[in-house]
Amino acid sequence: MRVGLVSAHDGAVMGHPVHRDLAQCDPGRLDTAGQPVTGTRQHIARLATELAALGHEVRVYQRRTGPDEPDGESSDGYQLIRVPVGPPTRLGTAELLAHLPELGRWLAGQWDDGPWTPDVVHGHFWPGGLAAASAVGHSRVPLVQTFHSIGSQQQRQLGTDYRGPRQRIALEQALCRVVDAAVAQCTEEVDELARMGRDRASVAMIPPGVDTTRFAPDPASPVRRRRRLLAVGDLTPGSGHDELIGALRLVGDVDVLIAGGPDRAELAGHPDARRLREVATRYGVADQIELLGAVPAGEMPQLYRSVDVVACTSRYVPVGTVALEAMACGVPVVGYAHGGVADCVVDAVTGRLVPPGDVRALGVALRRLLADEAERFAYGHAAVDRVRCRYGWDRTAAAVERLYQRVLGSRHGPVPAGSSGVVSGQLPDGDSVEPVDVEIDLAAIEDTAPAEATAPTEATAGPVRAG
């Protein structure tokens, strides 16, 4: 099967030059518009690697950000195509919007007239999905979409801290209705896609995988007398670090490490870092908090293993990556019972779940677990078993492969790995994967200035029918 993975964002992928090897934060390292992009890039790279290992011919399309960036085959078995669209520099999500029409035209030209046409296209994040939808709109090559985060849901949960481009919610609703199938990464996302007009039968719930060879327990980890607690995520209010700091009054004697945000050398002048230090001072726990800044991805497994408990308190967490990585290392999790964390953490089995925003319940759960070594040991062992059984990348890739085959089979009969046939046509009536007659006209945003990062009102969230 020929698979095209489309990401409108630039960025590092496995097997290629890396701009900055950052820890994957939950919901991802944010760009200037508050959009998670680092985790999305890492997800695409690993998915491409696993699909290639299954025998598929995989190409990853991402925007070129420098004159010397090469195309070519990665060491992980897939082709990386750097698309010459927009300025050769890194762009945030808001700045990227004006270049999506050109990206869609470039992809369409490659697939319509070139020697390689995908059997299925998989868009990632909403800008990548919009460009992919524009490119396949006339050929009817089937389109699968993973949003990675959804603006309407993010806006509800972050409130005034939401910083997405104002066009995002309306464009996502249109995209949701034009794709052949959608991948949700947590149960709440399935519900959100249904609210956006997507038939639940055409949504596959496929959580991301975890590299269980890297993220694994280490029996040789030193025994510590003073307890350590870790939180991973950007330093913005949406990551919930303020609430975690407030809960420490109920926890007592514990060191708290916060990984994420800018490089450590930049923390002194960073406004969010300054805000967190002020919060800690106000609660009288400043001496317990250490801001680590951006942590290299290669150092994350050891960081997880060096702590007793990992706290997951993000107000919006579509993907429970931090919880899963901690669990894979044998570390129990205390987190808010929503999003990806609610799916992967089993309360009183692999950790503890508390109501989102309930600072008192969070503090009590942390205090009790930190005080009970036997319970932490039991939760840690159960967590490792759960991740290895349910969240390996091989399992994730196999589920995505089945979704591709389902869409292709509904349209044109089964397409085996390695084939090069181009599928077209409409699904039969009543089939479980049903195309929707909606077109997205990207020309409407082509000549606009970069969208201002604002919190949309409910009026912006209505359905869009363009073209």
Image (cartoon, helix red, strand yellow):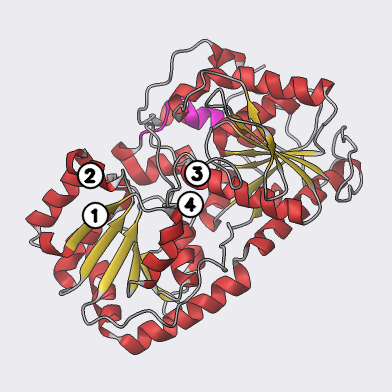
Tag shown at residue 318 = 4
Query: Where is residue 383 shown, x and y percent of the image?
Result: 49, 76
Name the amino acid, label 2: Leu
Mark 2 nearby-residue class (10 Å; few <14, some 14–19, many ≥20)? some
Q: Are marks 3 and 4 in contact (CB under 8 Å)?
A: yes
Name the amino acid, label 4: Pro
Query: Where is residue 392 shown, x and y percent of the image?
Result: 62, 66
Q: Which residue is at 25% across, 83% downward?
A: 371
Q: Identify the residue position indicated by label 2 in the image.
A: 267
Camera sees residue 441: no
CA gap, disc 1 to disc 3?
A: 26 Å
Q: Are marks 2 and 3 in contact (CB under 8 Å)?
A: no
Mark 1 nearby-residue class (10 Å; few <14, some 14–19, many ≥20)? some
The residue range painted magenta reads 163-173
Query: Could you tell me which secondary element the residue under label 2 belongs to?
Result: helix
Verify whether residue 203 appears in magenta: no
Query: Could you tell me which secondary element the residue under label 3 belongs to?
Result: loop
Q: Which residue is at 62% across, 33% downward?
A: 129
The N terminus, quarter of image: top right
